[in-house]
Image (cartoon, helix red, strand yellow):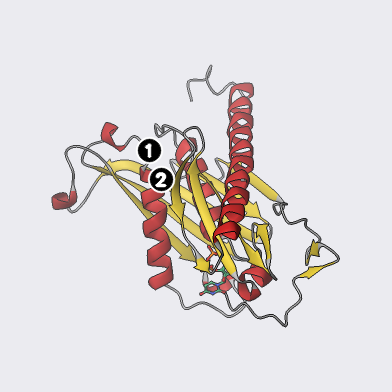
């Protein structure tokens, strides 16, 4: 968030990619894309490309980390070296450790971890191509992959960001807007409860701007939730259509 006033981000009331202020980028979602994972999802969100694989629940090692009252949900968010313009050094850094942590916490609020004592559920979030909003895309895909794995959940987690560019509050910032805008406000919610489980802010907003951005991000999350449910329903219909249940798969 440099807030560089010289870069034009809004022209004739439209954003650089032609979007309205309250319009999300194009989004595609798919589940069951990896054969060897318990559950998986692939999400394209604008130019972001995200793959998630879920493994487990399986026994947690080393044993002293086991909790007899619940499972551990462990997320690894990884930005691939080739996912960004300036090659990223492979391996974890402060940013990826932070995103892994907030993602684990958000997902732990819906996954029924108490059903699987002494185990771990591993969630691997691989960002193959990044164009801002990757933590939201990662969370959205991770939630789909957990559902695809059949792990009991109270609800999905839906995530979307809003922010401010050239003095205008907008939803779902892309890379140029993230780099040269004034603020980014990623959010994740439990849609059925309307409860916010992730809210971060990079930059500055006035109180009124915050209210507007909060509403745009929240409404964005609800749109994502609709897409997530449709994706899971379509996958289930396909499974049943292919005789998955009759075959005892
Ligand atoms: N980015 C990058 N190199 C990095 C980290 C981030 O080029 O080491 C880019 C990437 O496109 C990312 C964007 O900066 O999506 C915004 O990063 P931010 O930390 O705001 O997280 P995000 O918006 O992706 O959740």
**Ligand 1 positioned in quadrant:** bottom right
Query: What residue is shown at x 40% (from left), y 59% (from top)?
Result: 100
User: In the rendering, which numbered label is found on residue 111?
Assistant: 1
Seen from the viewer's position, the closer of residues 148 and 177 is: 177
Q: Which structural element holds mark 1? A: loop
Q: Residues within 10 Å of mark 1 (few under 14, many from 20)?
A: many
Q: Residues within 10 Å of mark 2 (few under 14, many from 20)?
A: many
- Residue 45, position in %: x, y? 65, 54
Q: Is residue 34 visible?
A: no
Q: Which structural element holds mark 2? A: helix
- The part of the image, by quadrant, that contains residue 115 is top left
Q: Are marks 2 and 1 in contact (CB under 8 Å)?
A: yes
The answer to whether 175 appears left or right of 139 in the picture is right
Q: CA distance from mark 2 to mark 1?
A: 6 Å
- Residue 126, position in %: x, y? 50, 59
Residue linked to disc 2: 107
């Amino acid at each position: 968030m440099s807030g560089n006033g010289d870069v034009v981000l809004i022209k004739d009331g439209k954003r650089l990619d032609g979007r309205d202020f309250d319009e999300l980028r194009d989004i595609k979602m798919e589940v069951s894309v990896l054969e060897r994972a318990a559950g998986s999802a692939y999400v394209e969100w604008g130019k972001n490309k995200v793959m998630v694989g879920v493994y487990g629940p399986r026994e947690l090692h080393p044993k002293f980390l086991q909790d007899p009252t619940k499972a551990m949900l462990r997320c690894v968010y990884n930005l691939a070296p080739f996912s960004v313009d300036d090659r990223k050094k492979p391996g974890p850094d402060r940013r990826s450790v932070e995103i892994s942590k907030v993602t684990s916490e958000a997902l732990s609020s819906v996954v029924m971890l108490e059903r699987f004592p002494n185990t771990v559920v591993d969630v691997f979030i691989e960002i193959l191509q990044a164009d801002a909003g990757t933590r939201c895309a990662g969370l959205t895909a991770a939630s789909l992959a957990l559902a695809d794995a059949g792990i009991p959940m109270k609800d999905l987690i839906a995530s979307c960001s809003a922010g401010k560019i050239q003095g205008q509050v907008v939803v779902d910032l892309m890379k140029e807007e993230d780099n040269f805008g004034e603020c980014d406000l990623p959010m994740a919610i439990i849609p059925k409860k309307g409860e916010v489980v992730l809210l971060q802010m990079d930059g500055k907003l006035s109180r009124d701007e915050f209210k507007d951005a909060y509403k745009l991000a929240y409404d964005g999350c609800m749109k994502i939730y609709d897409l997530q449910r449709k994706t899971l329903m379509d996958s289930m219909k396909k499974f049943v259509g292919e005789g998955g249940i009759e075959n005892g798969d």
